[in-house]
Image (tube, grey):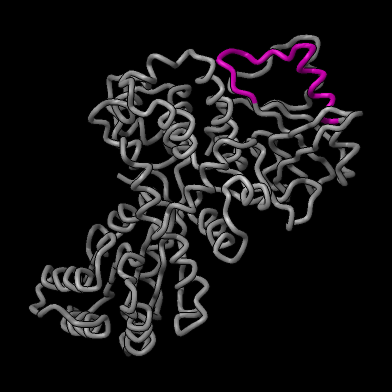
Amino acid sequence: MIIGREKERVELLSLLEKEEAQFCAVYGRRRVGKTYLIRETFNYQFCFQHTGVAKGTLRQQLTAFRNSLLAVGMKCSIPKTWIEAFELLKRHIISSPAGKKVIFIDELPWMDTPKGNLIGALENFWNGWATARREKDIVLIVCGSATSWISKKLLKDKGGLRGRLTNRIKVVPFTLRECELYAKNSNLALGRNDVLELYMILGGIPYYWSFLKKGESVAQNVDKLFFSETAQLRDEFEALYSILFKRPENYLKVIECMSSCKKSGMTREEILRESRQSDGGSFTTILEELEECGFIRRFASADTVSTNALYQLIDNYTLFYYHCIKKNAFSDEHYWSNTCTSASHNTWKGYAFERVCLQHVAQIKAALGISGVQTNVCSWYAQGTNKRRGAQIDLVMQRADGITNLCEIKHSINEFSIDKTYASNLENKVAAYRELSKDKRTIHLVMVTTNGIARNSYFNLVQNEVVADDLFAL
């Protein structure tokens, strides 16, 4: 049973209704459920389907392609080139029954080996044959986790495939609401606080959620998934980056420095300095590919130009790895259960909850009643001076209706209480933003908390509040 993905399923099924041949690219972060979505949508009925071989040689890729042809009843030897491989695919398609012919090629980026000329052969197959068929019956769906490859070779291709895609579908992680539905469908008795904590660890990645066991607490599940001797996701971090990137070392240098530096984000220059890499096109490519794969986000501060953009690490699992898994180094198989009330655990929760909120801006807007209002979403940070303390604002929403929401995000087990010290901090932030930013809109302070704000003498500083339950909205 598919949870969510209604829009994606409608778009995929619409390919069968088009009069012309269709070429669709489906892409997104590894483990996000792309393959499952496609197979379930088409009820596993394909004229031909094939999956590339991770880190396979050209010979291995071509052998696997031949094996996929054998699986649909075509007898053939191992092709020597991709041109020959696609010629064999043509023969199979021609011999297939009349009607729409859905061709599904999964993990296409893995098939692109050095000197293999996969793109040239694919271009020839599509431009020279599939679109030229009088029947107009080809529906070609290609899929890949290496989002940067899909972007370069298909979405932004400047060669023969330029403009040839008829559809592009990006599969994004589940929202909190979709994870709640997934848990319910899996008979996991999880309250919303449980779902929220698991989301802060696993993100909205269905593959990770599939390992959760019913009848066990969040702590028990996390210990078994990450810290036990036989933990299913014990080696996931290494696999995640090594499969996506051919040379993951420099990517991991960027990720690691961003995991340990200021949570408000880092400029390009700061990342260069902290990761100790040289400036140039390759470094720009690393940032672009990490962003395309959904590990980091790039955004301009509220009063800076795009050249001074900040970069933030936003992948929940990666944050959890650096803050919790790597520090433990698998020395305590009950690490999560033993530290769930520690100060370091609470620090991580605050950090992780902020990221969850940034991933649910649409739900925050809905809670504020501004879903239809055009909004520039950003962050803001000001260095301290001799006259003023430094100020950081987690989430800034500059609205077209003349209001700017300054959103403070706080994780708390109970109601969050604004005391005198924190009230002074809030007043400083609002004053600093009003004075130093170029924003002339009316300022409204919004508190985004897990369980609401205590009604005390400082409550009136806040114009609106959003609670964790609001983040579960559709």
- Res. 237 in view: yes
Taking the image as shown, residue 234 lies to the left or right of residue 265, namely left
Residue 149 sits in quarter? bottom left
Q: Residue at x 56, y 33 (%)?
A: 471
Residue 211 sits in quarter? top left
Residue 67 sits in quarter? bottom left
In the picture, the quarter occupied by the N terminus is: top left
Q: Residue at x 52, y 45 (%)?
A: 255
Q: Is residue 412 magenta?
A: yes
- Res. 10 in view: no
Q: Nearer the viewer, residue 335 or 301?
A: 335
Residue 268 horizontal/vertical position (percent): 66, 52
Q: Residue at x 66, y 44 (%)?
A: 266
Q: Nearer the viewer, residue 68 or 233?
A: 233
Please tell me whether residue 395 is drawn above or below residue 161 in the rendered image. above
Q: Is residue 93 magenta?
A: no
Q: Residue at x 12, y 68 (%)?
A: 71
Q: Nearer the viewer, residue 43 or 314?
A: 314
Residue 325 horizontal/vertical position (percent): 40, 30
> How many discs mark residues in the rendered view?
0
Taking the image as shown, residue 314 lies to the left or right of residue 268, namely left
Taking the image as shown, residue 297 lies to the left or right of residue 456, namely left
Residue 230 horizontal/vertical position (percent): 23, 30
What's the magenta region? Answer: 410-430
Please tell me whether residue 250 is drawn above or below residue 22 in the rendered image. above
Residue 326 horizontal/vertical position (percent): 42, 32
